[in-house]
Image (cartoon, rainbow, N blue to C red):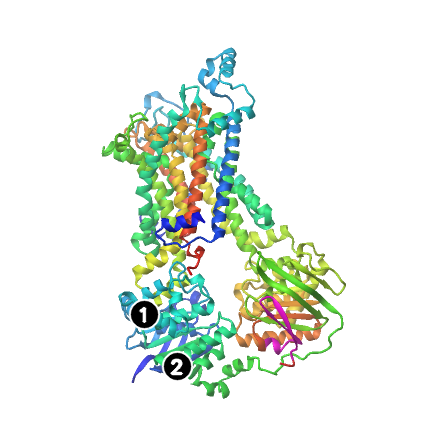
Amino acid sequence: MKFFTKDKTPRGKILAYCVLVFHGAIALLAPVLHLTPTDEQDATTMLQGISFDHWLGTDGLGRDVFSRVLHGGRPSLVIALVATAIAAMIGVSLGSFAALAGGWIDEALSRLIDFLLAVPTLILLLLIASFFGQDPVILSLTLGLMYAPPIARVSRASTQILLARDFVRVARLQGGNGLTILVNEILPNIWQVVFNEIAMQFTWIILAFSSLSFLGLGVTPPTPEWGLMIAEARSYMTINPVSVIAPICMLASLVLAVQALVDHE
Amino acid sequence: MNNILSFDQVCVEASSAKDAEFPILDSISLNLQQGESLGIVGGSGSGKSTLLRVAMGILARGLSLASGTVVTAGVDLLKVGPEMRQKMYGNKIALVPQSIGEALSPHRTIEGHFRDTLGSAASIEKMVDALVDSGLEGSKFLHRFPHQVSGGERQRILIALALVRSPELLLLDEPTSALDRDVAAEVLATISRLQVKRRFALICVSHDFEVVRRTCGQLAVMNNGRIVERGPTDHVLTKPTDSYTKALLDSIPKPNHRIRESHSIGSHSVISANKISVIRGTKNRVLDSVDFKVRQGEVVGVIGQSGSGKSTLLSVICGLVSPSSGSICNEDGFDLSIPLAKRPSNITSAIQLVFQNPDDSLNPKRTVQQSLSRYSGATVSQLIQVLESVELTSTFLSRYPSEMSGGEKQRVAIARALLTQPKILLLDEVTSALDVNIQAAVFQMLAKVQQSTKMAMVIVSHDLELVASFADRLVVLKDGLATEHGSAQIR
Amino acid sequence: MGLNQSSSMLFGGKISAFRDGNVKSILQRVFFSTCAFVALAAVAFIGIDALPGDGCTALLGRFGTDEQISKCRIENELDQPVIDRLGSWANDLVHGDLGYSIKRDQSVDEIIIPRIRNTLFLGLVAAVIAFPSAVVIGLLVGRFPKSRVGRIINSGSVIMMTLPEFVTATILWLVFAIWIPIFPGVTVLSSDASLAELLPNVWMPALTLAAVVFAHSMRTTRAGVSVVQMMPFIESARLRGTNERVILFRHILPAALPPVVNAIAVDLAWLFTGTFVTEAVFNYRGLGRLAIDAISDRDTSLILPIVLFSLAMYLTMSLVADIVVKILDPRLRVERR
């Protein structure tokens, strides 16, 4: 834990950046490296510990844990990136527009956002995943829609604060209309706060999808995914603990790295 | 050798280049005995507030004592531990800081505040006595919360809290800067009376000479961390020897001394407003049936206390606020009661407004050039020209707001308003946040601009002398009602 | 006016009265929340109904013939149009009848009520573990951020908060059920078991949930405290010689509370409605476990009440939080004569 006690100084942030780059590299390069195919089962080598052939051992079906772990981030990352992009686009435009428009439009949109926030997210995800098959497109869309409201809320609040500032009123006096004011005055001043919120939601989406996979409703096996791997490996934790610990470390380090970079308290 | 407070060649430095924007102190020496009162006057950045905190043994982050010693009530507070300092606060020495924000905890009653400072020696009697001494009817206030008292009452409560344990030394930082003029006068009288009665040593820090004149026998002027002049108050005010002091004193608007001469005023009105009312909520009449006219080339001053509706009047004229009733039109009869968004661009460019707070009126992420040209589409040479008219060089084009002083930012804001060559320029308390010598310079620049462009102006301020020395005509607003006071020449 | 009097009695006269405007706004909130609930309930009904399959297909599975399925539907009135069913369902609901699960052949309330009880029990245990310690620790860490202990707690809480529930659950399970066997690994009791019998099984899931929730409340408290202690009135109090402990508990804490109240309310709602994964890991027979089973069974008559319960819980908690924040704010009090 030593390196975490200084997470305000650059040292912590540098570490977080490295972890992120590491994850990015692995996610991109995994298929290119000559790894053991992730679904190659071998009944003779089940549940073996660390060995030269299998750097992290094998799982209950004889598959190579090391290569599965390296590939395991890709599904969540892809879905999370797409969903986050959707959530960001919807959230920022909805939130800033509500604040700019003011009046009853703002009221109505805020009520809508509160409405959406009341929806129990995991139930909805479970329902959709269960009833519509585990289609990644539908899941990304759902995740994007569900995680847009918090982003909308932050966008709206930051935009409102900015609208009260004199230089925005000056822009109106100088002839700026809603759109030009949004782009020129507001966005440059709110993007940092909003981006932080978007990054936080990104981590929640990753976790939601991993939880979904953990419950068996995310990726379809045999696709490797960290949540799924943890669920499968739980039953033989005592025999080959590495098969549980490895995906846990990967998932935790990714989420922690993003949060460490984004969180500034 | 009864010094309650003594500074001996105190030098305070910023420990890193980044903190160098904090005021520092340079060879400060002073002695204060029981019963004496010293006023310290200086602009922002002069170090006067830092001096008070150093007297309390507090050094802000990034500052360190380079040399010299400070002894307060017999103790060197910079060298003892925090518990010792806490024992002294309220007991031997007390500081009432500048209360721009809230100085009283919103979740605690006034009585609670007294108990905090009196500890086990608390009694209702002592609290009521302290409040009465400060000019308040004690028992009424004890159970109130801070949001239930007015600004003047709050200041008196703060003074009562500071004096309730009868300290030997009282330090006041800008005691009246947040108060209206007449309330301020009463508070200053109370301070003076208390000081005579209780014989504590007093240091009063302000940017306003008037505050010091009414409360302190001695006066020191600070500039850039040094004391540049010191002496009996009357003496310094009437016969200053230092050049900075002279500049400050000269900047104070004097009665019957005009910054600007009136000249050709056209006959037809650029703005003509009839019975304008602005009502917020159901009861609050921010403006009540106000008639208002500005003629071509005329400068009208609007004065009033805070809350009198002056800023709202300007907002109505430029269209940021729509009047609840009444009519307002320009010289061509165009109805100006429609909101800003619906006005055609030639109308909006003819009426421009400059805001009070220089820190807020420029986009912090944009350079001067970008802020000026974004909506006006002006060429670089046009920008340089307008910057020259506000006495700024072209080097300012590439600067960000964080790289400029308050006065410079305000000049840029004025330049931006001038770009569209408006027929009327509205100025909302544009120098209230600036030091008095910068204020004088800005108004002299405005006088030149008005002379060359012959545009109409409306100047809003709470400072009567300043406006009277500049405007052709005065309008006084009180609680939303307007009274005309005729030509400013006759006061 | 009755509300005013009862609030002053409730707090021993600590509050004299609410200004009328606030009572009005609270009633408005209640009204809006109720409308939101009704609207969301209708949306939920129609939405869940729109999902492929219904109670009959769940019962008969893949092997039911078309004949059997349509017979079952007519019997159970599942062939009526949506709006009619919505109406009769709403009608039943208002009269307290939660419906009937075709697949399990039981009335819904028989199934759900014990589960709700179990989950509420779990949530409360987690809340009692997490919230008081979170606020106290948040207060101290916010007040002394640079201390070594403060930084360790900070980092520890970041980790606790970002580890997915199932990871924390798995780690706890590994430690306390396998390596140092204190707690039972799985719950073998039925959902009707008494609370006392449930006690040994409640600790690990409660600890897991507490870990997630603790971090959120602690950080909200800490953030509130850091903001508040920069405010001018804190320095002002210190300069008057106020004791540090008084400053912490009487000046900083009350000012920092509002966002904490909101965070606790949201977390409480989550503790009662969002615990699927943890209950799944420990096989705890609560509402979350039931939800997962119901969804995999496609038992829509169960899913709907569970969704409604979540909605109601969330809306109620937000409302209660808003009311509490308003009560705590002295700016809303009327001056005594």
Q: Is residue B467 magenta?
A: yes
The local secondary structure at tag 2 comes to strand
| Magenta segment | B466-488
Q: Where's residue C282, x and y in %?
A: 32, 30
The quadrant where residue B331 appears: bottom right
Q: Mark 2 points at which residue?
A: B37
**Residue at the image point whose x is 34% and y is 30% from the top:** C281
The answer to whether residue B418 shows anywhere in this view is yes
Q: Is residue B179 positioned above or below A218 on the image?
A: below
Q: State how far apart marks 2 and 1 are (Cα).
A: 28 Å
Return the chain for callout 2.
B
In this rendering, the answer to whether A163 lies above or below B245 is above
- Chain under callout 1: B
Q: Which amino acid does label 1 sit on?
A: Glu
Residue, disc 1: B125
Q: Which of B432 and A184 is in front in this view?
A: B432
Amino acid at pointer 2: Ser
- Relative side of C171 to B356, left or right: left
